């Protein structure tokens, strides 16, 4: 085997290992706190340790894995501060993404987003935070769907994946934000429907996420 082909094969194995471990973390197979022992993973997956180590390093960079002294690599546990940071990052990304998606959203697209938002209201009334959180994601991705910037969409998906991994609804911690969040969604859609100033759309979408981050920050303050 030529050196070039060997390098390509190694990179391919590392990518496959990364996708495998990432999917198991996001679907809950490896829950928060689960230790990622490379030798054990090699036995489980049939993949050699070198690509698995590279995959674990990438997952650490993604924020899905943390390395703890005297413990080693493990699936990252819930960290309200990290959630807050991710929300602050999402605020900026979402603001711009909503702004550039708006011109591509036709009445039918806006109606679909409104339908999802109605489902969020119903989830609130039924005291179903898990469904509310899932629908909240669906709502925002119904807007991202029309974003013409593929790189931006990839960044958004990455940050949302980090939040999804936390496995807990942010709104469980800040329940007062839930109903206001639905109202802010409607405001965004109204602005998009009326072809409002793009800067106003961006401002409202950005502030929407910042408000959730600030609410989470406030509830974590020592009493």
Image (cartoon, rainbow, N blue to C red):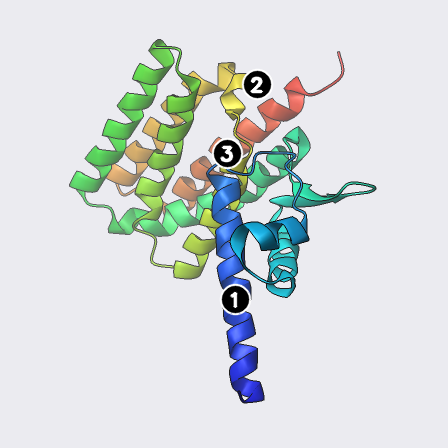
Q: As rendered, which of 69 and 220 lies closer to the eye? A: 69
Q: Can you give x and y, in whole percent of width and height, for residue 15 in the image?
A: 51, 63
Residue 56 appears left or right of 154: right
Q: As rendered, which of 15 and 168 lies closer to the eye? A: 15
Vertical placement of residue 189 versus 222, above or below: below
Vertical placement of residue 216 versus 127, above or below: below
Helix, strand, or loop for circle 1?
helix
Residue 173: mark in rendering: 2
Q: CA distance from mark 1 to mark 2?
A: 40 Å
Q: Can you give x and y, in whole percent of width and height, for residue 86 in the image?
A: 58, 40
Task: Say if mark 1 contacts mark 3, CB within 8 Å.
Answer: no
User: Depth-wise, is mark 1 or mark 2 nearer the camera?
Assistant: 1
Local crowd at mark 1 within 10 Å, few (<14), some, or many (≥20)? some
Helix, strand, or loop for circle 3?
helix
Local crowd at mark 3 within 10 Å, few (<14), some, or many (≥20)? many
Task: Say if mark 3 contacts mark 2, CB within 8 Å.
Answer: no
Q: What residue sits 49% from the left and 61% below the top?
A: 16
Q: What residue sits 44% from the left and 35% below the top?
A: 204
Helix, strand, or loop for circle 2?
helix
Residue 209: mark in rendering: 3
Q: Can you give x and y, in whole percent of width and height, for residue 221 in the image?
A: 72, 19
Q: Earlier in the sequence, mark 3 or mark 2?
A: 2
Q: Quadrant of residue 117?
A: top left
Task: Say if mark 1 contacts mark 2, CB within 8 Å.
Answer: no
Residue 138 appears left or right of 215: left
User: Depth-wise, is mark 1 or mark 3 nearer the camera?
Assistant: 1
| Residue that carries the numbered disc 1 in the rendered image | 13
Q: What residue sits 23% from the left and 37% below the top?
A: 110
Quarter the C terminus occupies: top right
| Mark count | 3
Q: Earlier in the sequence, mark 1 or mark 3?
A: 1
């Amino acid at each position: 085997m030529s050196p070039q082909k060997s390098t390509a094969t190694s990179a391919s194995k590392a990518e496959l290992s990364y996708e495998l471990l990432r999917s198991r973390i996001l679907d809950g197979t490896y829950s928060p706190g689960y230790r990622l022992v490379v030798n054990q993973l090699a036995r489980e997956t049939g993949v050699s340790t070198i690509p698995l180590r590279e995959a674990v390093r990438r997952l650490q960079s993604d924020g899905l894995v943390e390395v703890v002294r005297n413990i080693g690599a493990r699936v990252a546990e819930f960290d309200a501060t990290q959630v807050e940071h991710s929300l602050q990052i999402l605020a900026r990304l979402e603001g711009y993404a909503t702004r550039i998606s708006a011109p591509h959203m036709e009445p039918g697209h806006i109606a679909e987003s409104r339908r999802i938002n109605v489902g969020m209201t119903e989830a609130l009334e039924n005291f179903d935070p898990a469904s509310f959180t899932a629908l909240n994601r669906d709502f925002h991705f119904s807007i991202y769907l029309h974003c013409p910037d593929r790189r931006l969409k990839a960044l958004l998906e990455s940050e949302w994946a980090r939040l999804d991994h936390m496995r807990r609804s942010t709104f469980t911690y800040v329940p007062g934000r839930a109903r206001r969040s639905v109202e802010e969604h409607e405001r965004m859609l109204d602005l998009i429907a009326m072809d409002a100033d793009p800067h106003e759309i961006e401002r409202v979408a950005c502030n929407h996420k910042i408000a959730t981050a600030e609410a989470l920050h406030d509830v974590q303050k020592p009493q």
